[in-house]
Amino acid sequence: RPRQEVLVSGAGPVGLRAAVECALLGMHVTVVEMRSAFSRANILTLWAQTHADLVGLGAKYYYPSMQMVGNPRLFLGTRQMQLVLLKTALLLGVRCTYAARLAAVAEPRGAGGRWEAVVMPCLGRSAGPGTEGAGDSLGRALAFRPEKSARKTVVRTSRCNALEVSEVDGD
């Protein structure tokens, strides 16, 4: 049976969590995000179940203060939540495309056909995390710091393999 392919439109907390879940179920996942960087500054109060889920997905390694013992930290910024989920997604092989939008979806043609998606670059936006040199993009994600330098307006995707060095695919 061929591996199922999933396209997630949006790299917000819900989109990235859906991508992680699909990857854990063995699907080939691509995330498309219009923004070029995680820029949301909201601080969220986490439900205990959400906190436990993030800790289980690796947040305890990215944020050592996020443990389940004692009085757990139940506040987290939207951007930090996205970065925690992005790191986990990349380690699971999820491909991410930034500064791009889902323009159209076409139904399968005939029996055995596949759904098709058209992804277009967002004009005037620069490519964000996971779109440049492999070490550079992963380093930015792991450091939780936004990149301030100008980036090229080229849409690329990246994949991080847990056993190998991450690679950048120019799709």
Image (tube, rainbow, N blue to C red):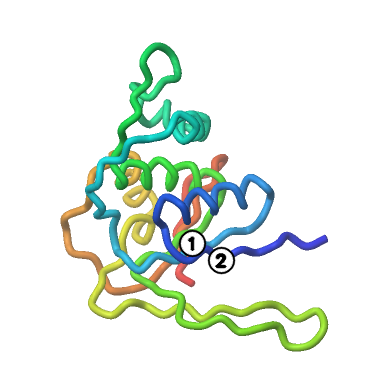
Describe the element under mark 2 as helix, strand or loop: strand
- The residue drawn where x is 26% and y is 53% is 40
Q: Nearer the viewer, residue 46 or 114?
A: 46
> In the image, is residue 98 above or below residue 83?
below
Q: x%, y% of residue 63?
A: 35, 28
Count up the numbered dots. Answer: 2
- The residue drawn where x is 38% and y is 35% is 46
Left or right for 9, reference 26: left
Q: x%, y% of residue 45?
A: 33, 36
Residue that protrudes farthest toward the bottom in the picture: 109
Residue type at tag 2: Leu
- The residue drawn where x is 45% and y is 19% is 68
Disc 2 from disc 1: Cα separation: 6 Å
Earlier residue among tags 2 and 1? 2
Q: Which mark is residue 140?
A: none
Q: Residues within 10 Å of mark 2 (few under 14, many from 20)?
A: some
Q: Nearer the viewer, residue 131 or 39?
A: 39
Would you identify the image quadrant in which residue 36 lies? bottom left
Q: Which mark is residue 31?
A: 1
For the N terminus, give its image quadrant: bottom right
Q: x%, y% of residue 52?
A: 49, 29
Would you identify the image quadrant in which residue 153 lies? bottom left
Would you identify the image quadrant in which residue 130 lies? bottom left
Label 2–label 1 contact, CB within 8 A:
yes
Describe the element under mark 1 as helix, strand or loop: strand
Q: x%, y% of residue 16?
A: 47, 52
Residue type at tag 1: Val
Q: Residues within 10 Å of mark 1 (few under 14, many from 20)?
A: many
> In the image, is residue 91 above or below residue 96?
above
- The residue drawn where x is 43% and y is 63% is 10
Q: Which residue in the structure is indicated by mark 2?
A: 7
